Image (cartoon, helix red, strand yellow):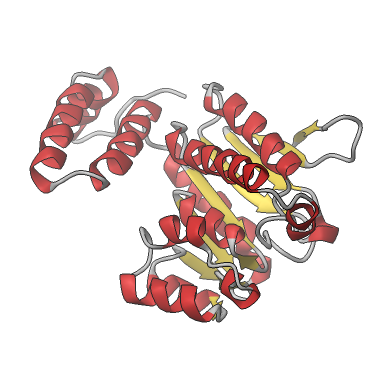
């Protein structure tokens, strides 16, 4: 496995990129700070996500964290050191852009949640297309405990979790277990910590057997239609399926089904 490291102005690497086959793993590398999302960390993630989105050799992206936590949310020390509304608006706009990039990029993104995921860290989990968690992981949108309602995390959380369950998490700040997170729809799979990497590798391998063009078109459609009314969503979905059906991969897949053989999609 090769590793490429992103560094900001001579500081220790904030994001490490590990590539293995068609899978790129982004590792948030502020373990001592529980991978808090400083403005520099968000910028480093944005740079790497933009690069991977344009890399046709990468089929799946995994988002992980170093140290004991997945991500503890925004860097509260940095926020407290710059008490101006203008700074806060820039910070949250920067973070929103990065979160939106996770869903706009063509590759499926899997959150690898080995530990704590709180506030904007929980937002990251909710924003990723898929999430696999260790059974020891915990989740919360706990800003309200500090007098700061997790408003931006609520956008992603409310699109993953039942409305009343999401609101309860937001107004109580209470933690939920990985099993509860799975039951509420925040994560897909929960496994023992020593099985986490194998489970993600198996999921990524299954995804990579599918044509990249179909996945990219489908992912784009999936998020766009969620924001539409039913009639508009069906219209867009029909247009997308028609375009998808004209792609060589889909034509080959259907022909293979008719001929009772495996499709020949190549690498």
- Residue 191 appears at what percent x and percent y? 56, 70
Looking at the image, residue 38 lies above or below residue 3: below
Q: Is residue 201 left or right of residue 245?
A: right
Q: Residue at x 84, y 39 (%)?
A: 13
Residue 48 point in image, percent of width and height: 65, 31
Rendering coords of residue 263 (x, y %): 29, 30
Asked which quadrant contains residue 11, the reply is: top right
Residue at 49% across, 60% down? 151
Left or right of residue 192, residue 253 in this image: left
Q: How many marks?
A: 0
Vertical arrangement, residue 57 with respect to residue 159, above or below: above
Q: Is residue 166 above or below residue 5?
A: below
In the displayed structure image, the side of residue 157 where residue 162 appears, left or right: left
Name the image quarter holding the N terminus: top right
Q: Nearer the viewer, residue 204 or 156?
A: 156
Residue 61, image quadrant:
top right
Q: Nearer the viewer, residue 192 or 179?
A: 179
Most extreme residue toward the left is: 231
Q: Position of residue 246 (x, y in %)?
A: 19, 19
In depth, the one of 199 and 154 nearer the eye is: 154
The answer to which image quadrant residue 244 occupies is top left
């Amino acid at each position: 496995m090769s590793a490429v490291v992103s560094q900001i102005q001579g500081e220790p690497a904030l994001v490490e990129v590990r590539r293995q086959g068609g899978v790129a793993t982004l590792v948030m590398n502020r373990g001592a700070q529980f991978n808090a999302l400083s403005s520099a960390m968000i910028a480093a993630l944005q740079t790497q996500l933009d690069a991977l989105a344009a890399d046709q050799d990468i089929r799946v992206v995994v988002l992980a964290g170093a140290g004991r936590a997945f991500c503890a949310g925004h860097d509260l020390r940095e926020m407290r050191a710059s008490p101006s509304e203008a700074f806060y608006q820039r910070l949250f706009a920067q973070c929103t852009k990065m979160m939106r990039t996770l869903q706009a990029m063509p590759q499926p993104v899997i959150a690898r949640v080995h530990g704590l995921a709180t506030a904007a860290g929980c937002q990251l989990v909710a924003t990723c297309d898929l999430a696999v968690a260790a059974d020891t992981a915990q989740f919360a949108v706990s800003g309200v405990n500090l007098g700061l309602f997790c408003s931006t995390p609520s956008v992603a959380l409310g699109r993953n979790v039942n409305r009343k369950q999401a609101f309860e998490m937001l107004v109580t700040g209470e933690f939920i277990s990985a099993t509860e997170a799975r039951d509420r729809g925040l994560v897909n799979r929960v496994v023992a910590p020593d099985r986490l990497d194998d489970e993600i590798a198996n999921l990524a391998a299954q995804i990579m057997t599918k044509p990249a063009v179909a996945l990219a078109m489908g992912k784009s459609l999936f998020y766009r239609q969620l924001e539409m009314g039913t009639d508009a969503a069906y219209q867009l979905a029909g247009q997308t399926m028609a375009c998808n059906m004209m792609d060589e991969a889909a034509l080959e897949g259907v022909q293979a089904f008719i001929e009772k053989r495996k499709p020949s999609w190549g690498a």
